Amino acid sequence: MPSTIVDLRSDTITQPTPAMREAMARAEVGDDVFGEDPTVNALQRRAAELFGKEAALFVPTGTMANLTALLAQTRPGDAIILSDDAHPYNFESANIAMVGGLLTKLVRAEYGVMTCEDVAAKIVQTNDHHFAPTTLVTIENTSNRGGGAIYPIESIAAIGALARERELRFHIDGARIFNAVVETGVAPKTYASHADTLSFCLSKGLGCPAGSLLVGDAKTIDRAHRFRKMLGGGMRQAGILAAAGLYALDHNIERLRDDHARAKHFRDGIERIPSLELALPSPTNMVYIRVQKAHAFAQRLAEQGVHVLPTAPDRLRAVFHLDVTDEGVEHAVKAFERALE
Ligand SMILES: Cc1ncc(COP(=O)(O)O)c(C=O)c1O
């Protein structure tokens, strides 16, 4: 067994800190299906206020946040526009098709970041019944498969304006929105102001064991609440999880800068190794590295205690999070060097 273990597979693997566990242990709870969990209610109010929306809904996962958002704002047989890198299209087990009955109109966009023109070109609104009516657009900020790429706020504003003009709903999958917030200085409210709904995850960079929130207008969140129930996402004394969320919003947003600094340090180290190459620009906490035979390469790294995720035959992903230290970064860069030998 290697003495140092650095797990860079995902920012979801973090362990709740003792202080977060303490907050969870102290949480006041009730039955949230009756709307009686004070800590869940406090978290929902806090999320709505943070993003400047009327209401918020606590759900177990980012997948359910996206799905309830789509179900609440479309009807089966509608078409939705999203990037071909988008999480719901790639990694949510076809729920948009199977559960939502939705047609996906895919945009091939650099780093998963669509322009307003890309979106406009995909809209179909006609009385010709050959076509599914386009009723929603969704973007992912930051973009996971895009290397943690950030949507420029101007593009979000333009897509938002287009959506309003064409009467489309606009959902932002902000699983990692706070990575964008700390990197750009754009406020959560500003991001959300251009969209009808926005979801964010507590269980990624914010370091919680589980949970996501969906924010939006009261009517849409009420519909999403019904779909949460339908999907089996009504939890009972969920305040134990919500307490972790409140703790994370107080303590773990600003520290995302440390993850970005470590990701940059790692990128610089990889760039100094002549036969390695970065696959994407990676401005936040996710770094994609181009290597030959990615699975075998990942295995050689694992033997040195460094765990990364092969995402393609020639691509590895390394994600920086709460449980990665400066020494871990140094160790990881050295492991990459040795894995080439
Ligand atoms: C951009 C994005 N959206 C949604 C999700 C889904 O979150 P969960 O794993 O909590 O269902 C993820 C998970 O990695 C993600 O990266």
Image (cartoon, helix red, strand yellow):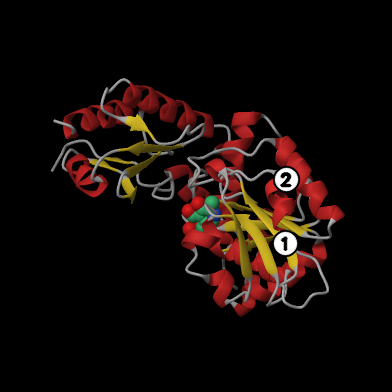
Give me the residue at 15% from left, 39% from top: 2
Residue 174 in view (yes/no): yes
Query: Left or right: 185 with respect to 268?
Result: right
Q: Residue furthest right?
A: 165
Give the percent coordinates (x, y) of residue 18.
Answer: 42, 44
Q: Residue furthest top?
A: 272
Q: Tag 2, which secondary structure?
A: helix
Q: Residues within 10 Å of mark 2 (few under 14, many from 20)?
A: some
When asked about the image quadrant of residue 152, the answer is: top right
When asked about the image quadrant of residue 276, the answer is: top left
Give the percent coordinates (x, y) of residue 172.
Answer: 67, 52
Is 253 rendered above or below residue 84? Answer: above
Q: Tag 1, which secondary structure?
A: strand
Closer to the camera, 98 or 204?
Answer: 98
Location of mark 2 (residue): 116
Q: Quadrant of the N terminus?
A: top left
The three-letter code of the residue at mark 1 reads Leu
Residue 136: assigned label: 1
How far apart marks 2 and 1 lie (CA) works out to 13 Å
Closer to the camera, 179 or 113?
Answer: 113
When asked about the image quadrant of residue 189, the answer is: top right
Does the CB distance between marks 2 and 1 fall below 8 Å?
no
The three-letter code of the residue at mark 2 reads Cys
